[in-house]
Image (cartoon, grey):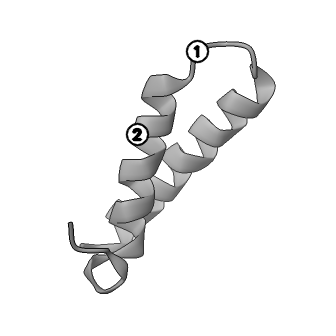
Amino acid sequence: MSQLDTHKWEKELRFLLDRIQAHPSRDATEDRQRIAVLKNLIAGPRDRVSA
């Protein structure tokens, strides 16, 4: 994973969180699923929980 990838994921995460905050009544199911994926990617392999 490169620093560039991490930066892109963090930027997307901030965008999604801002969108949820700006429009709390809209269905954000897909955004929340993507947020979970992004947090996992940003955390990296050492912080991931094995399923």
47 is higher (above) or lower (below) than 29: below
Mark 1 and mark 2 lie on one chain; the one further toward the N terminus is 1
* Circle 1 or circle 2, nearest the eye: 1
Q: Position of residue 50 (x, y in %)?
A: 22, 73
The secondary element bearing badge 2 is classed as: helix
Name which residue type carries label 1. Asp
Q: Quadrant of residue 9?
A: bottom left
1 is higher (above) or lower (below) than 37: below
Q: In this figure, which residue is indicated by the disc labeled 2?
A: 34
Q: In this figure, which residue is indicated by the disc labeled 1?
A: 27
Instruction: Identify the residue shown where x is 49% and y is 31%.
Output: 31
Q: State left or right for residue 49 relative to residue 51.
A: right
Q: Residue furthest front?
A: 51
The quarter of the rendered structure image containing the C terminus is bottom left
9 is higher (above) or lower (below) than 23: below
Q: Position of residue 18 (x, y in %)?
A: 71, 37
Front-most of residues 19 and 11: 19
Instruction: Identify the residue shown where x is 56% and y is 23%.
Output: 28
Q: Quadrant of residue 47?
A: bottom left
* Residue 8 visible somewhere in the drawing: no
Instruction: Identify the residue shown where x is 41% and y is 37%.
Output: 33
The quarter of the rendered structure image containing the N terminus is bottom left
How crowded pointer 2 is (Cα within 10 Å; few <14, some 14-19, many 20+) is rated as some
Q: CA distance from mark 1 to mark 2?
A: 13 Å
Q: State left or right for residue 23 relative to residue 50.
A: right
Q: State left or right for residue 19 relative to residue 31.
A: right
Mark carried by residue 1 = none
